[in-house]
Image (cartoon, grey):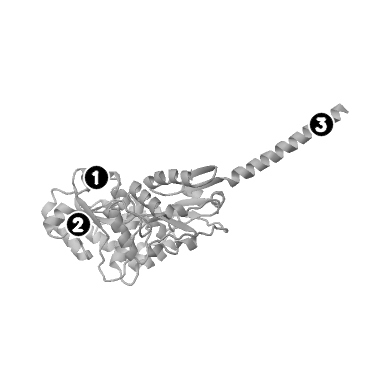
Amino acid sequence: MKRKNIIILVACLLICITFSCIFLNMYTTKNTYHIGVYSVPESLQKTLEPLLLDNIQLKKVIFHNLGEEELLNPKTIKKLDALFTQYNTSFPKPKKLAILKSNAQLLPALANTNQENFIPISLDHFEVCINTVYAQEYGQTEFTNLESLLHFASFLKEKYSSSILAPIFCVGGDDETLFQLIQGVAEACLKDNQHTQIANFLKNSTANAKIEDNSQLMEVLTEIKTWQQKGLLHERWYETNKRDLDYLFSERKAGIVLMPLSDHRQISYKYIRQYTSQFIPSATNKNRELVLPTYGAYVFSTKADFSFLLTNSIQGKISQQTGLSPVTLQAEANDIQSDDVRFWAAASKAMLQGKADLFENNTEASLWAKKIRDFFQAPY
């Protein structure tokens, strides 16, 4: 009889332990927030992580740094509550998404991103960075059309060829920078939004597709190669990398540099202070669509509220710590450059995203990057 009671007691204990484990697991899952992070500037990620830990009212927040293979795996995405990445990044979207609501005064081109379950957080910008010392001597510090900018580059070549590395410099060995340049020049040079035809062509192209298959792409690459041929753009620009920027600025070898604001922020103020920034000027009169990579969060669950990221105080803090532009109209920007980016973004019909607009994955992007670099390397 005693033995039977012991068995019953042990069985009851095991049942209790089992149910306790199930309940604990359910509680932990409900109170744990899993955030994926993919292709976000390091300064932004470092800024966001403590903000999220302090403001998400859950027991535990876990960050997962994803590689592309994980990003494209539906099973990985299914386990996440949110994904911090660049707007328009391709990944398998879950069928059930959170309903996003916010009263924030977003920039006009970002007003409808909540319909895609995306909360914008920060703006980057592919800029023209200009040496003000040379520009003041030239007699013009702001360039309203592409022809005037190239004329300034010719002036630099004629007068300062022994002092600067090249009149125009761009880190074309970096895929993201390469495609931001191409998209930016396409938008500035082509008429009637023909730059969108390049995006459609690249995103739907096969491995055997050629540059010559798309007349708009060929026109843009030929324009850039003409700068190279005339000695305005560094001869081997398509092989340079971001480490070259340190040398370029520290040795005062830069006249005009085409680069993202996020790279601009990595240059010591000691060297960058004599440079001003603007958008790529257009060769035609039209409403602009500038290259403004937008970073934020795709939200998949309602376990946490991300709307605090769009308050003016938090937007100002993020801009202050990253040097990137706020996405709301009234938040305080870090400085005049990030404030200028917001002003230009407010007037931009759309915000072009560079590589994220053009390709479904990095394999396709790398394939086209090689084709394009081969084009620039080939004899004129």
Q: Position of residue 195 (x, y in %)?
A: 35, 66
Q: 372 or 345, which lies in front? A: 345
Seen in the image, is 364 located left or right of residue 21? left
Seen in the image, is 218 located left or right of residue 204? left
- Find out whether the residues at labels 3 and 1 contact each other: C-beta distance under 8 Å: no
Residue type at tag 1: Tyr
Residue tagged 1: 269
N-term-proximal mark, 3 vs 2 = 3
Residue tagged 3: 7
| Figure quadrant of residue 294 | bottom left
User: Where does the N terminus fall, quadrant-wise?
Assistant: top right
Tag nearer the camera, 3 or 2: 3
Residue type at tag 2: Leu
| Figure quadrant of residue 113 | bottom left
Q: CA distance from mark 3 to mark 2?
A: 88 Å
N-term-proximal mark, 3 vs 1 = 3
Mark 1 Cα-neighbour bin, 10 Å: few <14, some 14–19, many ≥20? few
Residue type at tag 3: Ile
Determine if residue 130 is in view: yes
Q: CA distance from mark 2 to mark 1?
A: 26 Å
Q: Residue at x 57, y 58 (%)?
A: 96
Mark 3 Cα-neighbour bin, 10 Å: few <14, some 14–19, many ≥20? few
Determine if residue 375 is in view: no
Q: Which mark is residue 232?
A: 2
